[in-house]
Amino acid sequence: MDRRRQSRVFVDLPVQIWGMDSYSRPFMQPASLRTISGRGATLQCVDARLKPGDVVDVLYEGTKAQFRIVWCGKPGTEMAGEVGVENLSSEVALWDVDPQRCAAAAGQG
């Protein structure tokens, strides 16, 4: 059974992320969005050492929002470099895709 509260949409969108890693060192790097939902996303190609609870800034097409790390893929697995994030900037719409509508349209096709 799927524990997700919101529908996800698979995407491949380039973003820039930055913040403080788990060693309290600043980092900045390119990454990409793999999935998006109304309140969160999955980032991939993340090299920085992060842990749940850390906060990162995400820049997409000139718009910035803060996200909290919810989960991190374990090193040495196929999910290494993936990070689940939750939007802390509820007033900022980082992407103009409505995941609910996309999921409904995909189900009808």
Image (cartoon, rainbow, N blue to C red):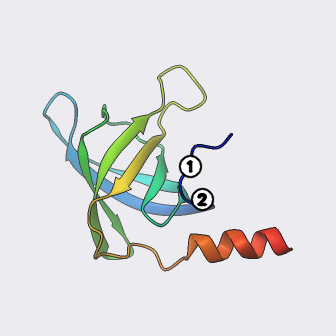
Which amino acid type is marked by label 1?
A: Arg
- The residue that disc 2 covers is 8
Q: Which mark is residue 17?
A: none
Q: Is residue 87 left or right of residue 32?
A: left
Mark 2 to mark 1 CA distance (whole Å)? 9 Å
Q: Position of residue 93 (x, y in %)?
A: 37, 76
**x and y percentages locating residue 89 in the rendered image:** 26, 67
Residue situated in front as seen by the camera: 101 or 96: 101
Residue 44 versus residue 41 in the image, above or below: above
Task: Give the image quarter of residue 26.
Answer: top left
Question: Which residue carries the number 1 mark?
Answer: 4
The residue mark sitting in front, 2 or 1, is 1
Q: Position of residue 65 (x, y in %)?
A: 28, 66
In this picture, is 21 found above or below 90? above
Question: Is residue 74 toward the left or the right of residue 1 in the image?
Answer: left
Residue 24 in the image, given as x and y percentages of width and height? 13, 33
Please rate how many residues cluster around mark 2, counting C-alpha atoms within 10 Å: few if below 14, some from 14 to 19, many from 20.
Answer: many
Residue 57: quadrant of the picture: bottom left
**Which residue type does callout 2 highlight?**
Arg
The secondary structure type at the circle numbered 2 is: loop
Q: Residue at x 69, y 39 (%)?
A: 1
